[in-house]
Image (cartoon, rainbow, N blue to C red):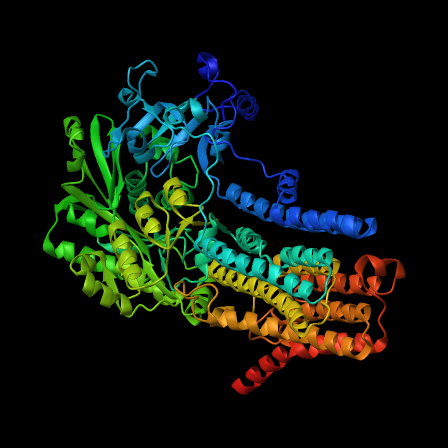
Amino acid sequence: MSQKTPPDETMQQNINPEKGLTAQQATERLAKYGPNRLVEEKEIRFLRILKEELTEPMILLLITVGILYSIWGNIADALTIIAIIGMLVLVEAWNEYHAKRSITALKKLAAPTSTVLRDGKVMEVLTTEIVPGDILILKPGQRVPADAGLLEAAGLEVDESSLTGESFPAPKETGVLMLDAPRFIDRKNMVYAGTIVVKGRGKALVTATGINTELGRVADIAKTTKEPKTPLQLGMKQLSKTLLRMAIFFSILIPVLAFLGGLSPEQSILYGLSLAFATIPEELPIIITMVLGVGIYALSRKNAVVKNLRAAETLGSTTIIVTDKTGTLTENKLRVDSLYFDGRITQKQEFGHNEKEALKTALLASDAIKNVAVKTTLNNPFADAILEAIKENGIDLQKLQTTWILKDEASFDSKRKLASYVYQLGKSTVVLSSGAPEKVLANSEKALLQGQEVPMTEELRQKILEATSSMAQKGQRLLGFGYQRILPVQMEAKYRLERNLVFVGIIGFMDPPRKEVKNAIHMCRKAGIKVTMVTGDHHETARAIAAQVGINNSKVLTGEDIANMSDEELKKELERTHVFARTTPEDKLRLVRLLREKGEIVAVTGDGVNDSPALKEAHIGIAMGIRGTDVAKETADMILTDDNFATIETSVKEGRKIFANLQKGVSYYLACKVALVASFLLPTVLGLPLPFAPIQIIILELFMDLAASTTFVAEPQEADTMKEPPVNPHERFMNRKMQMRILKGAVSLFAAVSTSYLFTYYSTQNLAQSQTVAFATWMFGHIFLALNYRSEKQPLIKQGLLANKLMILWALGTIATLVISTNISALYNLFKITSLSLSDWTLSIGTAFVATFWMELRKLQQKFSKH
């Protein structure tokens, strides 16, 4: 695709850096420059799909049958075939259109967003709607959505490896836009589309979007890349080829045998073509796409956006969930609960003047004071909580902002577990640092007590550690903070900013567990799914939260413990340890890798840039939709739009339902195909006329397709879905159990049709009546079979007959078609049928019911035997 118009030099004019574009300006520029994308997305159109369906080999085969009917039969037969072609094509085109629209809709839900300044407000907009002139707000973890010139930067470093191949992050600084620099990598005041903000923050003016960006110039992307086939789709493709050969074999064999038995050449050819159309399993890929597509769309409405069909397949096989704590198991609504200061722990409601002054220091040490008024999902939750506490205590923020001027920062690092901010306070330069209490303490040479800086003795250090443990045991999240005064020249050595600190205190935050999480974890355990918590928090905090949500906390390992273990030792610990604290992203990646080596199917949650390796290593990477970074969301297979662990349990449950419905739909579809071939084979061997006319075969195919590709998609979840162990991913989709089910269904339907047909034919020697009875038996039989196939274990009476309303509508439509066609004489010749007597109806319904509903009796027997 191409941009409508490349950005011009006037693009930067009339833009207020403090307010950004107006909504109207953004709309006008989007129309002028086009969407911010490199790839053209094809619109899903019903007419295009309809055209594709009309040119399908099976439809062309059916049209051939219609033409031959008009030559060897009469025009009425040909018109009937054309009408059925129309119904079949419309049904299949609509099913495929609905499935593709569902998948497209979930892709839109998973579409990346960017933080911009518009109308003076910080807001999230779709990345595709970024336009030249937009003001970007840059923070760690974001993927830069467009080329932009920096207006402000504080400790900003950007990973440009996607463009340059350089593995080290590039430092960025503000300055005059150097658009005419000979090499784009030399433009230190520019950030580029596709690169990742690693550290610091900034504000930037968008200069180019879409293919006009540096990434657009080096990328040669013209069309949307197709999603690769999933293992199941590939397996079904191979199965389809095998079944195709079998279908063609019998479509030739049966007509040849019938011809040798006396059937005319014309009729033999018509039978062969009709049988080929009915038995070739061309709908198998459509059934799989339908079930997966509709299933993952249903998931998106339950706050889980599954980004690809492969993940939808794997969900039902999950054996262990490796989850972080904050925001997933907990509410992620931090509130200041207590403060360790001046050698004692004080509860929030008891804060005095000294504690309020300490809060100011904590705010300055936890995030840049200049951004206290900016409220976005990317804000530091610790800073937000401290800010709320400051507001509640009536502290003058405006004065604080004007007094403390931010000069530089060293963003939080998972290895250092510290963040530091350099401020100008009058003529002094002050560094304020915050992070894990033990890290702040380890870097402190002094402590602030009663307003005095005193040496950090071992006794004082031990007292602080005891306070840390006491606060953590209550389930609090902890943030230690301190400061040091430096000379301006020392700012160049950032790695030394956090040495020789003066320890000030520890803030304890409460982040209560989500109410629904405990039950979700209980349901996971019942379903044979283990839950392991991996967090960077203090081990006592992790232990307390684990106890509250029902995770086994009898043993807790820290990142330091993990580092001292060999892989074999850690594998053994993974059998009995379910809580890991003070871990790094590298620890998390190692745990996931070892779990995979143990044969587990692993689902992993993550939200940061450093979580992306673990998300990629897992079978299913799950990113947080609210607090997750762009990189985590792009790497993950699934995004939780509510950041809630309970949604993972819901997703696994839905994944099992998707897999079960796939097996039901495919089993039913293939059972009907096998039954149809067998129903023709027996009379041929016996030297009798065939049980269905060619036109009847085509009608049967219409109703078979409707049931398999539509009604099983709507099958609700079974009550015991989460009481079964996970699906074995190494087992073939069509395992022995499924093969036996197909065989039992096929034999049952074949037995019903053959019994009623042979009984009627031998009794009356009337072919039209015999074929009509066989036709009616099939129609009732495949309805009863579909009802039986709704569950393998649960009796229909337990499931509820009306639970799958779509199947009931299909059944009523099938019965209505049968009743109308056997009672309107004008249709007799079209459908090659006749009227039926009461005894004929009794025979058809009775044999169909007895031949299939033995399965329900078997389910009831098994249910009662358990009790």
Q: Nearer the viewer, residue 467 or 495?
A: 495
Occupied quadrant, residue 431:
top left
Q: Considering the image in quadrants, where does the C terminus appear?
A: bottom right
Q: Residue at x 38, y 45 (%)?
A: 635
Question: Which percent across, then down, holds residue 452?
Answer: 17, 43
Seen in the image, is 139 located left or right of residue 266? left
Q: How many numbered badges does the structure rendering display?
A: 0
Question: Which percent across, then down, holds residue 589?
Answer: 28, 53
Question: Which percent across, then down, holds residue 813?
Answer: 76, 61
Seen in the image, is 620 located left or right of residue 41? left
Q: Nearer the viewer, residue 702 or 683?
A: 683
Q: Residue at x 63, y 38 (%)?
A: 48
Q: Nearer the viewer, residue 772 or 194?
A: 772
Seen in the image, is 760 located left or right of residue 440? right
Give above or below for 547 relative to 326.
below
Q: Is residue 393 visible?
A: no
Occupied quadrant, residue 783:
bottom right
Q: Residue at x 48, y 69 (%)?
A: 722
Q: Is residue 567 visible?
A: yes
Q: Residue at x 66, y 55 (%)?
A: 273
The outermost residue toward the right is 825
Q: Nearer the viewer, residue 251 or 46?
A: 251
Occupied quadrant, residue 56:
top right
Question: Which percent across, then down, holds residue 404?
Answer: 29, 31
Give above or below for 429 relative to 436.
above
